[in-house]
Amino acid sequence: MRIFAFAVAALLSMINSVATNYASSCSSPAIVQDSQHQYLEAACLLPSFVVEAPQSRCSMLDLNLCYGFIDGQIKAEDGGNFSTQCDEHSIRMDGSVVRATCTPFPLPGDTHPGKVQASIDTDPLIMVDDMGMLVCLSTFKLAAVAATVDVTIP
């Protein structure tokens, strides 16, 4: 049990030392698109142990790597390709919240599925690594963190 607790503590320490939530470290978040991808672009501060004077780095992250469109909602999902069901021209940022107009997969017999307005706060999942780059905190790591909150050591 103590070895497991040590491993969990090491994992949590590694996650916390490598990345911080991007909303507190980045400015000017925006959606940038090409023909197949929707990127979150932001100017992120480099940590003080990397540079002496404050400096920012422009960083981009493909949101399709972090989110999927599931059951009418944008949700955290590694490689979820959420934009395949969302109108690319409707995807926008509102602070750290991504908003989009999306079309759910049709139910059996539904020939005209309606569009839904979907949104998700990206700050809990997207982090800035120690080089100022935007990264997804994988859903596996989120599950590991959530699963270890209630661990007690006798």
Image: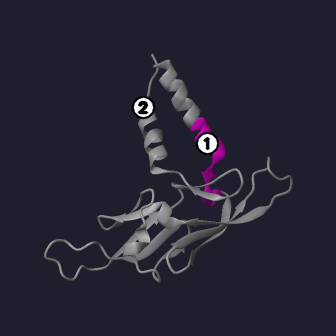
- Picture residue at 56% right of the left edge, 37% below the top: 12
Q: Position of residue 1 (x, y in %)?
A: 45, 19
Which residue does the numbered mark 2 point to in the structure image? 150
**Between residues 18 and 34, which one lies in front from this camera angle?**
34
The disc labelled 2 sits on which kind of residue?
Asp
Residue at the front extreme of this rendering: 36
- Magenta residue span: 12-24
- Picture residue at 48% right of the left edge, 60% below the top: 66
Is residue 94 visible from the viewing direction of this image?
no
Residue 150, picture quadrant: top left
Which residue does the numbered mark 1 point to in the structure image? 16
Crowd rating for badge 2 (residues with CA inside 10 Å; few <14, some 14–19, many 20+): few
The disc labelled 1 sits on which kind of residue?
Asn
**Between residues 141 and 98, which one lies in front from this camera angle?**
141
Q: Position of residue 112 (x, y in %)?
A: 21, 83
Q: Position of residue 100 (x, y in %)?
A: 43, 75
Local SS, label 2: loop
Determine if the magenta segment contains residue 17.
yes
- Picture residue at 61% right of the left edge, 39% below the top: 14
